[in-house]
Amino acid sequence: MSQINSEYLNKVYDQYVDKIYRFALLKVNSKTAAEDIASEVFTRTLEYFDKNKDVKIANIQAFLFRTASNMITDYYRQKSRGNVPLDYESRELIEKETSLKDRPDSGAFINEQMAHIRDALSKMENEHANIVMWHYIEEMPIHEIADIIQRPEGTVRVMLHRGLKELRKNLS
């Protein structure tokens, strides 16, 4: 890999790793799985750049989030087949058991609220949940979300509206 690509990828990693991790964490509800997914997104991006040296990606954020979405889908496919390593499930149980009793009251309240929001998001249509998270949590503008899901901006606005309606219903 050339020096320019290496420097560029370092900047991309620094700029987006937290966003990709947060997105994965909200989707899979496991810190370990979210860390693995975020790591793998950047590994695959590096591999993509190595194989396609002359290809320019117009919107790297869209590329990264699309890759993360695909990996989350793969994670759930593997989990439904029983192919997720035991390590994920055991750590997830430990996190759930210790999260409320080891934290101060404010931390417990925040954890409880986040669990409630995660549960409401998990009941939503996947694409609507992603759009709501990208727009309100990651503060992405509509045109960037349109790039990620490869749909017109008007369609994204309608999907965001429907997603919010669905989220309100799930939270009540």
Image (cartoon, rainbow, N blue to C red):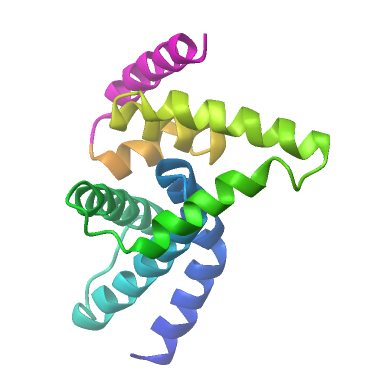
The quadrant in which residue 48 appears is bottom left
The quadrant in which residue 47 appears is bottom left
- Relative to 18, does residue 1 appear above or below in the rendering? below
Residue 62 picture location, percent across and down: 35, 51
- Relative to 7, does residue 35 appear above or below in the rendering? above
Furthest toward the bottom, the residue is 2
Residue 14 picture location, percent across and down: 56, 68
Residue 10 picture location, percent across and down: 50, 77
Start-end of magenta stretch: 151-172
Residue closer to the observer: 141 or 21: 21
Residue closer to the observer: 9 or 23: 23
Confirm whether the magenta stretch covers residue 137: no
Which residue shows up at 55% across the image and 53% down it?
94
Residue 42 shown left or right of residue 111 in the figure = left
Which residue shows up at 47% across the image and 34% down it?
133
Which residue shows up at 22% across the image and 78% down it?
54
> How many discs mark residues in the rendered view?
0
Confirm whether the magenta stretch covers residue 152: yes
Quadrant showing the N terminus: bottom left
Residue 167 shown left or right of residue 146 in the figure = right
What secondary structure do most residues of the magenta stretch adopt?
Answer: helix
Residue 26 shown left or right of residue 44 in the figure = right
Residue 46 shown left or right of residue 81 in the figure = right
Residue 149 picture location, percent across and down: 27, 39
- Relative to 57, does residue 167 appear above or below in the rendering? above
Which residue shows up at 45% across the image and 23% down it?
120
